[in-house]
Amino acid sequence: MTPYEGCNDYINAVFTNSYTQCDGYVLTQMPLPDTVIDFWRLVYDHAVSAIVMLNDLDQLDETCGQYWSLSSSGENYGPFIVETTAEILSDPSITIRDFTVTNTYLFHFHRWAEDCPVPSSKMALFELIDLVETCQKHAPDQPVLVHCM
């Protein structure tokens, strides 16, 4: 991974095949406060085109914070400046954010509560899958990163 002082090469993530591509997905946990730089190193080094966040942010849970900036000027995460260049509420269940660090999209799914084994809306999940597949048509050889809490 991209070298950065104080960071090692390990991140809790695994590659898995999609139905069209070897290593088409990267599965990981939501970054912890001390692994946000590692998370962005993973995104950058593997040219991740889309991040799928399957949970909502819990403002009371300090172990998993927001890893993107709400400011148009961006935020520094180690050697990376991550700017949110667009934010679209595609559906009440899904927010799409465009980041400039590597032209990566974040598909933030809001309908899967932390304590539920399945999402509250199957149709919203199908919409999420459709949106991610549409995004992948522009970068078919780049992996999609999927994470939850």
Image (tube, rainbow, N blue to C red):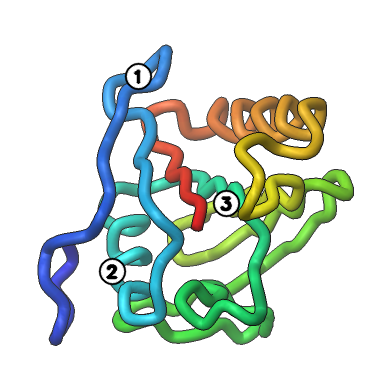
Q: Position of residue 27 (x, y in %)?
A: 37, 42
- Within 10 Å of disc 1 (Cα), the crowding (few <14, some 14-19, many 20+) is few
Instruction: Identify residue for label 2.
Output: 38
Identify the disc placed on residue 21.
Answer: 1
Q: Position of residue 97 (x, y in %)?
A: 67, 58
Q: Amino acid at mark 3?
A: Met
Using the numbered discs, state the Cα–Cα distance from disc 3 to disc 2 in whole angstroms.
17 Å
- Within 10 Å of disc 2 (Cα), the crowding (few <14, some 14-19, many 20+) is many
Q: Nearer the viewer, residue 36 or 115?
A: 115
Left or right: where does residue 31 sit relative to residue 7?
A: right
Q: Nearer the viewer, residue 58 or 2?
A: 58
Residue 72 image-quadrant placement:
bottom right
Identify the disc placed on residue 98.
Answer: none
Q: Residue at x 51, y 49 (%)?
A: 51
Instruction: Identify residue for label 3.
Output: 53
Please tell me whether mark 2 sits on a helix, a strand or a loop.
Answer: helix
Residue 18 image-quadrant placement:
top left
Quadrant (top left, top right, bottom left, bottom right) of the N terminus: bottom left
Q: Nearer the viewer, residue 138 or 3?
A: 3
Q: Amino acid at mark 2?
A: Asp
Q: Position of residue 66 (x, y in %)?
A: 56, 74
Q: Is residue 5 above or below residue 132?
A: below
Most extreme residue toward the right is 92
